Amino acid sequence: MGGRWLAGYGWVALLVVAAGCVNVLSAAQHGAANWAALRGPVLDEITSALVIICLLPLIKHSVDRLATTADRRIALIVIALAMMFYALLHISFMVALRFPVYALFGSGYDFSWRDHFATEFRKDLISAFMIAVLFWLIDRRSAAPVPVVAQVAPDARRAEIWLRDGTKSIRVDPGQIISVTSAGNYVEFALADARHLIRGTLTGEESRLRPFGFVRIHRTRLVNVTRVVAIETRANGDFVAKMDTGEMIAGSRRYRDAVAAIKGTAT
């Protein structure tokens, strides 16, 4: 998991904890002034927050589909299904956790699936939607594009870079690289006849490869503009770069400036 992913996860988890604290304080304000009265609300909020924090990756990965899937309808369907699955898991694990926790503090817990399930499911769908919006806003802010300057070095085809692939270092002609993709704590270099996975960050590789005509078209992807043969723009503003190998690489509308840079280089 990259640092940006962990940062977004941490902020949302912190908001979940803060919401639980607010609910407990509200219970105290409405008459639960001692531990015996506060015990139920405190245990309820703790168990609920623990399960929510464990399930956050489910919502996060579904929201990521908005940026990685060309068809937004499919991405929205995936998010909707993930929200319903999240709600079912949250209720199931929360109820299962509360029985032993309540017993540990010397009291009993009662949950009627017939009477309470519909209400809890509706509440969880709303919270899942709010969490998805938070992740989307965090990603949108952190992925704000920087101005792209695609300047291909005159001797780019004669230059070379070194990639450390496991225990060996490989000399590569930058002109042979098609794309570079982020993969957690690694980046994958895609060549026409090989792929190399090296430890590093996409931001670092972007700085190293910019002089050779590489631009970012997605928050997780760079492409070699000298190997782009066509740009297909989608109705939603996203686009697809067709490479000279026939590969189609999706780009995000957040990096629409890259399209102008690619076309300008081709001209």
Image (tube, grey):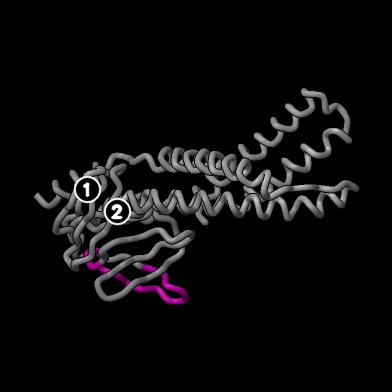
Q: CA distance from mark 2 to mark 1?
A: 8 Å
Q: Amino acid at mark 2?
A: Ala
Instruction: Name which of mark 2 and mark 1 comes first in the sequence.
Output: 2
Mark 2, secondary structure of its residue: loop
Q: Which mark is residue 234?
A: 1
Q: Residue at x 47, y 53 (%)?
A: 81
- Residue located farthest toward the front when viewing the structure as drawn: 114
Residue occupied by mark 2 = 70
For this view, does 175 lie left or right of residue 198? left
> From what the image shows, is residue 24 above or below residue 73?
above
**Nearer to the camera, 79 or 184:** 79
Q: Residue at x 30, y 47 (%)?
A: 252
Q: Residue at x 86, y 51 (%)?
A: 103
Instruction: Check if residue 117 falls in the magenta segment.
Output: no
> From what the image shows, is residue 119 above or below residue 203?
above
> From what the image shows, is residue 216 above or below residue 186?
above
Q: Where's residue 146, x and y in %?
A: 33, 40
Q: From which residue to which does the magenta span run?
A: 163-176
Mark 1, secondary structure of its residue: loop
Does the residue at mark 2 contact the one at mark 1 (Cβ under 8 Å)? yes
Residue 203 visible in the snapshot = no
For this view, does 75 lie left or right of residue 121? left
Q: Which mark is residue 208?
A: none
**Nearer to the camera, 144 or 21:** 21
Q: Where's residue 2, x and y in %?
A: 50, 54
Quadrant of the rendered image containing residue 170: bottom left
| Circle count | 2
Mark 2: give few (<14), some (14-19) or many (20+) Cα within 10 Å: some
Q: Amino acid at mark 1?
A: Arg
Residue 5 visible in the snapshot = yes
For this view, does 177 lie left or right of residue 18? left
Mark 1: give few (<14), some (14-19) or many (20+) Cα within 10 Å: some
